[in-house]
Amino acid sequence: MQRANGTLVAPNMFIPYAEKNNLILPLTELLLDQIYKDLPKLEGFVSVNIVSEHLEKGLISRYLLNRDDSNTAKLCFELTERQPMTNFVAATEEIKRLSQLCYGVKLDDFGTGFSGFSYLQQLGINSFKIDKMFIDTIGTEDLKRGVLDAIINFGHKLNMSMIAEGVETQIQLDYLKQHNVQFVQGYYFARPLPLNELLQQHYTSQ
C-alpha cells in the first residue's frame, strides 16, 4: 500500500489492522476495481489474495458477474488460511463458479498452516503455492528441504499445478526446474514495482 506522500507500507503492517477492523472485504473490492483498470496493459494473469469469507459468501463470483469484461479470465485468486473455513459447501460451490469465470483459485502458502491438506481435499482446489520458507532451504542442509521435496512429490502425484514463491537465486530456480515445478515468482525476476516501472522495464524491452 502506498501513502499519499509516496512511502510504501508493507502488507504485514496493515493487513492485521484491516482484519481486526473488518476491512478486508471492502479493501479487496477496491483492489479489484484498481486491477481492472490496469489489466488491459498486462499480459499473463494477476493473482489476488482472498480469505474464506469471500468464498463462503460468494462475493468474488458476484463481483465478476457484474462486469462485462473479457479481462476477467486474467484473474486468479489465492486463498489464505488467515481465517478458518466454516462453510465448505458454500465455498466449494463458489470455487466451481470461479473456475468458469477466471483463472481459478489456488491455495496460498501451502505447508505452513494446519488446514492445507484438508482444504485441498474438501474444496477441490487443484493448485497451490509453495511458501518461501521452503524455497529458502534449497542449497542448504536445512531439514525442511525434505518437506519441500515431499510437497513437490505430493503435488505431482495428485497432478496439481504448483507455484514456488520467493525465488531469489539461480540455484533455487534450477532446482525447481529439475523438479518440474511449473511456475515460479520472486526477486530473481523482479522486486515489486509500480505499474509504470513494470511496463517500462518488462514490456518495452520485448
Image (cartoon, rainbow, N blue to C red):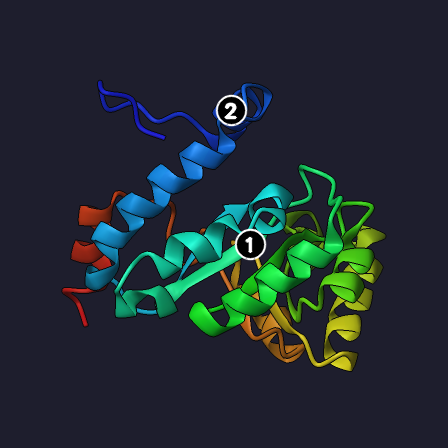
Count all numbered tags in the image, as a single digit: 2
Mark 2 to mark 1 CA distance (whole Å): 18 Å
Q: Residue at x 38, y 58 (%)?
A: 64
Could you say where residue 151 lies in the image, as x and y percent from the top left? Answer: 77, 65
Q: Is residue 170 left or right of residue 74?
A: right
Local crowd at mark 2 within 10 Å, few (<14), some, or many (≥20)? Answer: some
Using the image, tell me which numbered label, if any, was put on residue 18: 2
Could you say where residue 84 lies in the image, as x and y percent from the top left? Answer: 74, 40
Q: Is residue 23 left or right of residue 29?
A: right
Examine the rendered structure and indicate whether residue 33 appears above or below residue 65.
above
User: Which quarter of the figure is the C terminus placed in?
Assistant: bottom left
Mark 2: amino acid: Ala
Q: Residue at x 38, y 61 (%)?
A: 65
Mark 1: amino acid: Glu
Q: Is disc 2 placed on a helix, strand or loop?
A: helix
Q: Is residue 185 left or right of residue 70?
A: right
Q: Which residue is mark 1?
A: 78
Q: Is disc 1 placed on a helix, strand or loop?
A: strand
Could you say where residue 34 lies in the image, as x and y percent from the top left? Answer: 27, 44
User: Which quarter of the figure is the N terminus placed in?
Assistant: top left
